[in-house]
Image (spheres, rainbow, N blue to C red):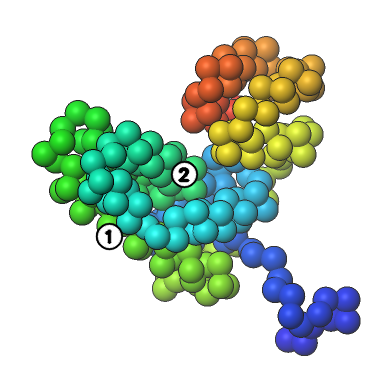
Amino acid sequence: MNASPSMPSREKPPVTVELRADSATREVIDMADGIDRIMGNRALYARMLKRFRSDYALGAVPIGAALADGDTILAHRLAHTLKGAAGLIGARRLHQQASTLELAIRTNPPAQQAALAALVDPFYQVLHLLDRVLAGGAPDGMATEAPQRTLMQDPALLARLVQLLIDADGAAVDLLEESGASLRVILGEARLAQLTKAVNDFDFDGALRALRQTAS
């Protein structure tokens, strides 16, 4: 297809995120779950996939290097961050293995190397799949178009809040204070209170879970 005059050929078209229906792909990344976690915002999910691929280009190497250096504090933080990031994009196996490794680093040093080794394969599968998806190639199996989900009121405000929570950015506290009235209408008093408590405790994973429940 020729590029339109308004779009130079050197520019890449925006990434289109589809829901992969084959079970093998869902075992690696359940994109439907990932999109659902951010209330159906597919554009934001596409940016999350790009960021994950960029942030974790070296796979498990940084965690392994930290363990080899005896820096268990850094290794634990890296495993914890990976667990959260994998969960957000719907990479369930990687999330589970990162959780196992995080626990081993904290409580069971003899199990650390086995847990690290178990992380390598699901990590590789996620990165390989992301390379294909972000390049526009569909994995083997059926691909279906994602149903359009009605976003909640003021999607720009919610998208900004989600992005701050994903980034573990303390500016989420300011956003809640500045936009509390709007968020109270969107989320309801009880849900907003739950979200606010999590953010004020800097529990960004908990805040994302609370926010996700509003879309149920």
Residue 85 shows which numbered tag? 2
Residue 163 shows which numbered tag? none
Where disc 1 sits, the SS reads helix
Q: How many marks?
A: 2
**Above-or-below relation of 3 to 144:** below
Q: Residue at x 24, y 30 (%)?
A: 106
Q: Quadrant of the N terminus?
A: bottom right
The residue beneath circle 1 is 121
Quarter location, residue 166: top right
Of residues 48 and 211, the one nearer the viewer is 48
Q: Residue at x 14, y 40 (%)?
A: 111
Residue 51 appears at what percent x and percent y? 56, 54
Q: Residue at x 19, y 28 (%)?
A: 107
Q: Is residue 113 visible?
A: yes
Of residues 52 and 5, the one nearer the viewer is 52
Amino acid identity at mark 2: Ala
Residue 190 appears at what percent x and percent y? 62, 12
Where disc 2 sits, the SS reads helix
Q: Residues within 10 Å of mark 2 (few under 14, many from 20)?
A: many
**Above-or-below relation of 89 to 175:** below
**Above-or-below relation of 193 to 63:** above
Q: Is residue 49 visible?
A: no
Q: Residue at x 28, y 39 (%)?
A: 71
Residue 83 appears at what percent x and percent y? 39, 41
Q: Quadrant of the C terminus?
A: top right
Quarter location, residue 109: top left
